[in-house]
């Protein structure tokens, strides 16, 4: 895809990773 698509994909990946991290902290 384009660079913008790649950036958007990375943002979604980071958001998912952060969400998983928060779930781990809450346990």
Image: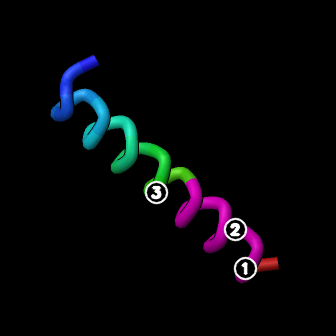
Q: Tag 1's secondary structure?
A: helix
Residue designated by label 3? 14
Q: Quadrant of residue 5?
A: top left
Dot 2 surroundings within 10 Å: few (below 14), some, or many (20 or more)?
few
| Residue 26 numbered mark, or none | 1
- From the top left corner, tell me how far across and down residue 19 is, in percent: 56, 61
Specify the quadrant that holds the N terminus. top left
Vertically, is 4 above or below 15? above
Taking depth in this image into account, of 22 and 10 the one nearest to the observer is: 10
Q: Tag 3's secondary structure?
A: helix
Q: Colour scheme used in the picture?
A: rainbow
What residue is at 44 percent from the left and 55 percent from the top? 15
* Chief secondary structure of the magenta portion: helix
The CA span between labels 1 and 3 is 18 Å
Residues at badges 2 and 1 in contact (C-beta under 8 Å)? yes
Vertically, is 7 above or below 1? below
Taking depth in this image into account, of 4 and 12 the one nearest to the observer is: 4
| Residue 16 numbered mark, or none | none
What residue is at 66 percent from the left and 61 percent from the top? 20
Which residues fall within the magenta stretch? 17-25
What residue is at 83 percent from the left and 78 percent from the top? 27
Dot 1 surroundings within 10 Å: few (below 14), some, or many (20 or more)?
few
Mark with earlier residue (1, 3): 3
Q: Is residue 21 magenta?
A: yes
Nearer the camera: disc 1 or disc 3: 3
Residue designated by label 2? 23
The CA span between labels 2 and 3 is 14 Å
């Amino acid at each position: 895809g384009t660079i913008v698509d790649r950036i958007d994909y990375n943002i979604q990946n980071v958001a998912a990773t952060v969400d998983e991290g928060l779930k781990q902290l809450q346990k």
